[in-house]
Amino acid sequence: MPITYQHDVLIIGGGAAGLSLALRIADQCSVAIITKGPSMDGSTYYAQGGMSAVLGGEDSFQSHIEDTLNVGGSLSNAETIKYAVEHGPENIRWMQELGVPFSSEIFKSGQRELHLTREGGHTHRRVVHAADATGKAISDTLENHARHHDNISFYESHIAVDLITTEKLGDEDIPNTCIGAYVLNNKSDRVETFQARFVVLATGGASKVYLYTSNPDGSTGDGIAMAWRAGCSVGNMEFNQFHPTCLYHPEAKSFLISEAVRGEGGKLLLPDGKRFMHKFDKRGELAPRDIVARAIDHEMKRLGVPCLYLDISHRSPAFIASHFPTIHERCLQFGIDITKEPIPVVPAAHYTCGGVNTDLNGLTDIENLYAIGETAHTGLHGSNRMASNSLLECLVFAQSAAKDISSRASKPHRHQKISGWDESRVTDSDEEVVISHNWDELRRFMWDYVGIVRTNKRLERAMHRVSLLQQEIAEYYSHFRISSDLIELRNLTLVAELIIRSAMSRKESRGLHFSLDYPVADESSVAKDTVLIPQHRPVTKKIKIIK
């Protein structure tokens, strides 16, 4: 018998964006949170640096806005940036009230205040953090509150398969509206139906499409892929941020060396111990991430070496142990004492700057479907994300989405009847190797052909290969019972296509997209977002700012 769940709000994803929205709406609505696994499987949990917000001193909203515009380039949306920056401080205070243990210090006046660090692209110290494990502190606190709320239900070991829309059900009397999702329960291996008035995609980014990434295994672009298949437009998918410094060690899977290490004086070194960043940018190690990542990539290829080095050992052992305890401990596990020696580092795929197009309330092109956090394209990041603006985006737009849902929750609505998932014509797979092989092939050619530096020829090769993979996966999907690995591979392959198509359409180098065939930015016309629309749908944006 098919299982169907009914809730007011269905949130797909349990990171900072999803959890904070759930807490803000739960007093008014019943909420279901779907997660692939425990909270530590998400990207929020591993965020080290912190959240940017203007909290006094010599800093100002205008300074934060200008810094974000400068890093994001001419594709940043000034209205979005202003909205996010101005709502940052109140979200920090909200998290403090919930008990997030942000790092603090006692000033000469005897007053204890939040400790602020500085990261690449920022002109002031404005990054609030909890030592070097900010994401864990935020995630643990939000989840603890959510699990103790009577109106919030968690469904772990569940992975969403596809969104359910009125268009898919053949209802043409109303605009295309999202009314739920089909979800695979990994414990029972059966697909269940979740019906809800409002559906929120908070699934994170898609950096697992690359062979080397700082992200956990779940960053497979599920929300972006599901939204596209449902009819949503996407924007700026070519802008994939590669974090300059991930730990280089054969056993250190996806371990990030925080931007804050460079913010506190860390120096990037060649194998011979010489610094090099000054040759690429006057800001040196504090240049934006795209510049630092390309510089490291360039030097590695020039010298033919597998990694470069990041040195913070000139700071005192006490300072390092107190500011970077997680990094210090993790490196020691691999025999690297960062108080005495430099850290071997390489760039790795880190953040998806593009995503599902939304307005300032997180609303997509489909009624009652929201996208927040890394899944969304709000215009905040433009062609390059400034450090620690990601958690800011998660919290601020979860807040605005919650306000919008609250304003609409009490209005009457028409209940839709949804049929259960039909798997009567499929069988169990007898060739699981197809999934593992295609997964490996996809991530390798994306790294080789659609990575930090691109060319027309590389992109053409990647598009050819992704098309072949999609044909194989579609055939496999239609004949066999689905699994979580197949769902993720199907989503990643679609997102890979969107990234490649977006990159092929941009005939210039801008921000995180660097092409050897078009090495400079096109300044002959106004820079435009790369917008892809499925099945030639008209895009209708409903911008509504909540003050």
Image: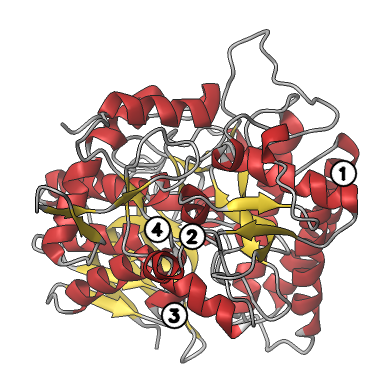
Mark 2 vs mark 3: give the one in front: 2
**Label 3 neighbour load within 10 Å: few <14, some 14-19, many 20+:** some
Which of the two labelled residues, at mark 4 and mark 2, occupies the earlier sequence position?
A: 4
Pointer 2 residue = 315
Looking at the rendering, which quadrant does residue 97 occupy?
bottom left
- Give amino acid for label 2: Arg
Pointer 1 residue = 458
Which of the two labelled residues, at mark 1 and mark 3, occupies the earlier sequence position?
A: 3
Residue 431 at x, y percent in the picture: 79, 86
- Give amino acid for label 3: Gly
Q: Residue at x 42, y 71 (%)?
A: 321
Pointer 4 residue = 202
- Give amino acid for label 4: Ala
Residue 443 at x, y percent in the picture: 75, 63
Mark 4 vs mark 2: give the one in front: 2
- Give amino acid for label 1: Arg
Pointer 3 residue = 37
Q: Residue at x 41, y 48 (%)?
A: 388
Which of the two labelled residues, at mark 2 and mark 3, occupies the earlier sequence position?
A: 3
Q: Residue at x 73, y 30 (%)?
A: 505
